[in-house]
Image: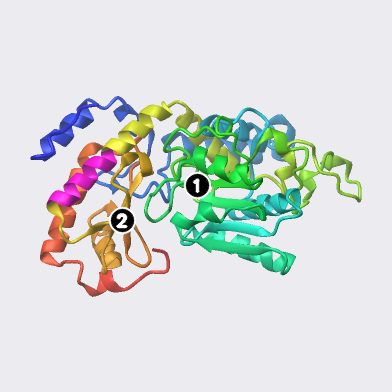
Amino acid sequence: MTQLSPLKLDRSQFELLDQNDSLAPMRDKFSLEEGLIYLDGNSLGVLPKATADHVSQVIKHQWGVDLIRSWNSHHWMQKPTQLGHKVGRLIGADVGQTIVCDTTSVNIFKLAAAAIKMRPDRSKLITETGNFATDLYLLQGLAKLLGDHIEVISLPRDEVLQAVDEDTALVLLTHVHFKTGSMWDMASVTQITQAQGALMMWDLSHSVGAMPIELDQINADLAVGCTYKYLNGGPGAPAFVYVAQRHLSQFEQPLTGWLGHAKPFDFVDDYQGATGIEQAMCGTPAVLGNAALEVALDLMLSADMAQVRRKSQHMGQLFIELIQQRCPWFELGSPTNPEQRGSQVSLTHPQGYAIMQALIARNIVGDFRAPNNLRFGFTPLYLRYVDLWDCVEALVDIMSTESWNQPQFLKQQAVT
């Protein structure tokens, strides 16, 4: 990959990087408004061009014409398993361990409850303070439901692993932190957790689709993740569940809906869970959501994830260099080491919300996370190097002129 001189960066150097970028042709497969610089794929991925036609075909023909026959003729009922195989290829999971269903929040509840039952003599659920809110809230809700014998322990990042002991049932961590982009070493953390007899659950929502992941190789136990960020499955796209093959015989999730039954169409009164990953199912598959996700997964599988990761790391480093050279107003909120950082860079500033709104008004879209994080996501399949330069140019102007200090930018909206 072409390296730039750190002494003097200019726009022409970034244009040259785009000309030599082997991933550049992938950009044409996505629907991007002319002039838009989209740096928020870590929150909602861009629409693949092929998605609209495929979903329209599912609506007009499979639903509109074939109607209920499509559960068989178009394999609607099998889609969670089929899509699970495709997600499995992206997370290093052999067939039969991953299924697409429900939401990340619901799936965390399922897996955490199952983990507690698999470690019945243990009481601690350990996670990180500042973890993504739903991860914390679901553990708290589960502990409240089960009673005083279950305790949620949230600790700062540098204290988490030291707290794992013989009374720990489960450790739940997000692979890439949603605010800072800080990345856990999955292999070593999993090994340390398992050495104490605890189960390890990874939330892959901010890493899947942005880098190679090898769950089987690191001997992972459990994982969840969403598909609407780097995987571009669309807003509210179905999430996924991973349960290692060696745990499936013990795995019992509590949301015993009809599609987790061993024989759901027998309609017997008593629940008997499926023996495989299908037990993680609960309710009816989201047919239209699955249709959109299938297009996105096929597109993602056509890319080399190692190459995607290299470009992502390179973009992150260049962005950090530009900020350090040209934007003294900000503090860096992400690790400088690319091996310890996911596919995003966060900057911090007391007026971060207003600054981001001013940037969005210029058609440069990142996002904000309270209390002071401006997040910039790097999605290598459709992001250009020159977009980084233009983003920083706009930031320099916004900060030097204080154009962020206007009522329309200071008023906070419901979704940040």
Q: CA distance from mark 2 to mark 1?
A: 19 Å
2 or 1: tag closer to the N-terminus = 1
Residue 199 screen position, x and y as percent:
64, 46
Residue in front for this viewpoint, 1 or 167 = 167
Q: Is 26 rendered above or below residue 242?
A: above
Label 1: state its secondary structure: loop
Residue 298 screen position, x and y as percent:
50, 30
Label 2: state its secondary structure: loop
Q: For residue 126, what is the image quadrant?
A: bottom right
Say which residue label 1 marks. Answer: 205
Whether residue 183 can be seen here: yes
Residue visible at 48% across and 62% down in the picture? 129
Q: What segment is highlighted magenta in the picture?
A: 315-325
Q: Quadrant of the N terminus?
A: top left
Display colour scheme: rainbow
Residue 40 screen position, x and y as percent:
36, 50
Residue visible at 16% across and 30% down in the picture? 16
Say which residue label 2 marks. Answer: 333
Q: For residue 328, what is the image quadrant?
A: bottom left
For badge 1, the amino acid type reads: Ser
Q: Quadrant of the C terminus?
A: bottom left
Q: Is residue 60 left or right of residue 359?
A: right
Query: Magenta segment, principal secondary structure?
Result: helix
